[in-house]
Amino acid sequence: MKKTIRSITCVMALMLLASTAACSKDTEEVQTTAAQTEAESFSVENLYGTWKGTDGEISTLTLDKSGKYLDDAGDGLYIAGTFIVNEAAMTMTVDETDFGMVIVYHITYTGDTLTLQMDGGLPRKFVKTK
């Protein structure tokens, strides 16, 4: 009787472990598929235009086809320069002209929403206005 209970317990534990592993794998596949879909649908063309800050972001970004970048926080505060996008890596490198800063952002793009994230920095969220 003890052997039967022990065997049933072992079988149930193995089934639980197998179902947990399968769920983890499914979750990873969904996350990977979503990231692949985002990267596949993303193009630098999606970035051209004007982006208004949301969720506490006060700046308005203007990104044009010639590679010009303007980050306007209002009241005469702005960063101007050029930008280059690495579509495969989903990054944007901004070369700011007045102070010579180079900033690399990781891009998350979904429809009319853009998030720029520097390593160690807070995410900057924008919505496309035109």
Image: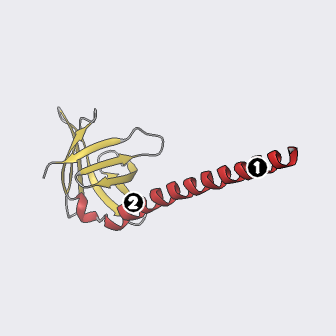
Q: Residue furthest left?
A: 130
Q: Is residue 77 left or right of residue 36?
A: left
Between 44 and 20, the one lying in front of the other is: 20
- Is label 2 in a helix, a strand or a loop? loop
Between 81 and 90, the one lying in front of the other is: 90
Q: Is residue 99 left or right of residue 31?
A: left
Q: Residue at x 26, y 49 (%)?
A: 113
**103 above or below 25?**
above
**130 above or below 86?**
above
> Is there any visible trace of residue 16 in the rendered image?
yes
Q: CA distance from mark 2 to mark 1?
A: 50 Å
**From the image, which quarter does the N terminus lie in?**
top right
Give the colour scheme of this rendering.
secondary structure
Q: Which residue is label 1 attached to?
A: 8
Q: Quadrant of residue 84?
A: bottom left
Residue 28 % position (x, y): 52, 56
Between 65 and 21, the one lying in front of the other is: 21
Q: Residue at x 24, y 35 (%)?
A: 58
Q: Indicate which disc, 2 or 1, sits on the residue closer to the N terminus.
A: 1
**89 above or below 54?**
below
Residue 86 % position (x, y): 38, 64
Q: Which residue is label 2 attached to?
A: 90
Residue 17 % position (x, y): 67, 51
Residue type at the position of mark 1? Ile
Residue 110 % position (x, y): 29, 54
Q: Residue at x 28, y 35 (%)?
A: 55
Residue type at the position of mark 2? Met
- Is label 1 in a helix, a strand or a loop? helix
